Image: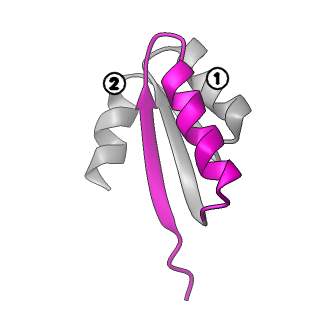
Amino acid sequence: MNTKKTVVVIDGQGGRLGRMIVERIRAERIDCHIRAIGTNTLATNAMLKAGADEAATGENPVIGACRE
């Protein structure tokens, strides 16, 4: 059974901090699924480029991801 954890990274504006968090998780080779949620497309794209497994933009994805 695969018990891979999901990490949700939420960031806004340019996504600089979110990008740094995603890059660090990948550099440490932590076995997890990274779900990036940006408050705008700039933040979302920055985290995707850093190596997030999936991404979404806006308020509703934040609400949905935090429920899980």
Residue sitting farthest toward the bottom = 1
Q: Look at the image and tell me whether residue 54 can be seen.
A: no
Q: Which quadrant would residue 29 be assigned to in this image?
A: bottom right
Residue at 45 percent of width and 39 percent of height: 9
Q: Which quadrant would residue 44 be assigned to in this image?
A: top right
Front residue of this view, candidates 25 and 62: 25
Front residue of this view, candidates 38 and 61: 38
**Mark 2 Cα-neighbour bin, 10 Å: few <14, some 14–19, many ≥20:** few
Query: SS class of the residue under badge 1?
Result: helix
Q: Position of residue 18 (x, y in %)?
A: 51, 30
Magenta residues (range)? 1-30
Decide if residue 65 is on the left or right side of residue 1.
left
Which quadrant is home to the N terminus?
bottom right
Q: Is residue 49 above or below residue 1?
A: above
Residue at 46 percent of width and 52 percent of height: 7
Q: Is residue 42 above or below residue 25?
A: above
Residue under pointer 1: 46
Q: Which quadrant would residue 59 be assigned to in this image?
A: top left
In the picture, the disc for residue 11 is none
